[in-house]
Amino acid sequence: MKQQITTLLATCVITVSAFAASAETSVRMLKTWDDRYTGSSVICDRYAEMLEEASGGEISVQMFGPETIPPLDQLEPVQNGLFQVLCTYPGFHTGAITLLTGLESIRPEAEAFRDSGARDVIDEAYGALGVQTLSVPLAHGYWIYLNRDLSDQGDLTGLQVRALPPQHPYVASLGGTPVVLPPAEMFSALERGVVDGAYFPAAGATGYGFAEVTKLYFDTKTTSPHIILANQSFWDGLDDATREVFESQAIVLEDETPGVYDRLNAEEAEKMAAAGMELIELSDEAAGRLAAAVVSGSWAFAGSRNPDEAARMREAVEDAGLLRE
């Protein structure tokens, strides 16, 4: 990985030199997903398009995906300036900061979230890592996909379910055993029965082949707080007019994301039904356990590296009435 980053850094220097004589702002944006995950296009690619359009072409964006830098290794290359912008899910850099996990327990209401003051806490926490927070689009719709039936208890007892560490309490609340697997290995693991299920976004599930290797799914009713970050030195070097483009388009993106995901999730449900998959409902008792675990687990994980910030942010979203019941 270090050799790969060194090679890319050399390329970056050449690219920057080529644009040195131009007034254009050239951005190397790194994104966590390939095009199988719809959020890759409706959040990451969409923001890049908006920047270019709103600036009249003065901002140009060159996109790089997980084939360039793996998802779990993407924060550092943005911190050190190899890339200027990162579009990602905060669960992929919990080795550095865990704060945003708490937002999995809130309703995806963009304006109310901005007005809550939670962004001040986020800006401060990420700023300490040498990056500038540009946008926090609140997507929603996480399902658990299963290749076998629920247990006799009507939950995940005895089942192994792929999930990232922040979501382990959600799986455990239903009696399941959480398993960490990178996205690229999920399909084969489900196909071979290595795991019995997977916690994954609704939007893009068919692109990852879930309909081919699972037969049931249910809604976990959680929110996915994506985040777009900029290298701090890059951000500090922009003029006010260029920063205003980044900031104004971030607001537009945040405002449109929940509605886009309403549509995408509905479309995904139709695809799943057409493929013969069944949407199931947990019992009221099991659903209550899951809902409680989403709140308690998300904020416990948020505070595992950032206890003071997590407490302040939870207070902000609770005061704004955004916390799910």
Image: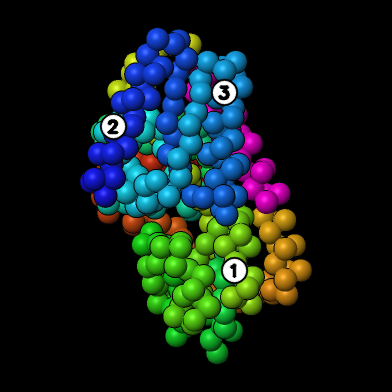
Q: On the picture, is 152 further left or further right than 90?
A: right
Q: Residues within 10 Å of mark 3 (few under 14, many from 20)?
A: some
Q: Residue at x 44, y 34 (%)?
A: 29
What separation in Å lies between label 1 and label 3 (alpha carbons)? Answer: 34 Å
Residue 179: horizontal and vertical position, in percent?
38, 72
- For disc 1, the marked residue is 210
The residue lying at 48 percent from left, 53 percent from top is: 105
Q: Which residue is mark 2?
A: 10
Stretch in magenta: 242-264
Return the residue nearer the eye: 26 or 171: 26
Which numbered disc, 2 or 3, marks the residue that appears first in the sequence?
A: 2
Q: In the rendered image, is residue 83 in sight?
A: yes
Helix, strand or loop under label 3: helix
Q: Residue furthest bottom?
A: 152
Measure the C-alpha gap from mark 2 to mark 1. 39 Å
Rendered image: mark on residue 18? none
What type is the residue that disc 2 sits on?
Answer: Ala
Q: Tell me, yes or no, if residue 221 can be seen here.
A: no
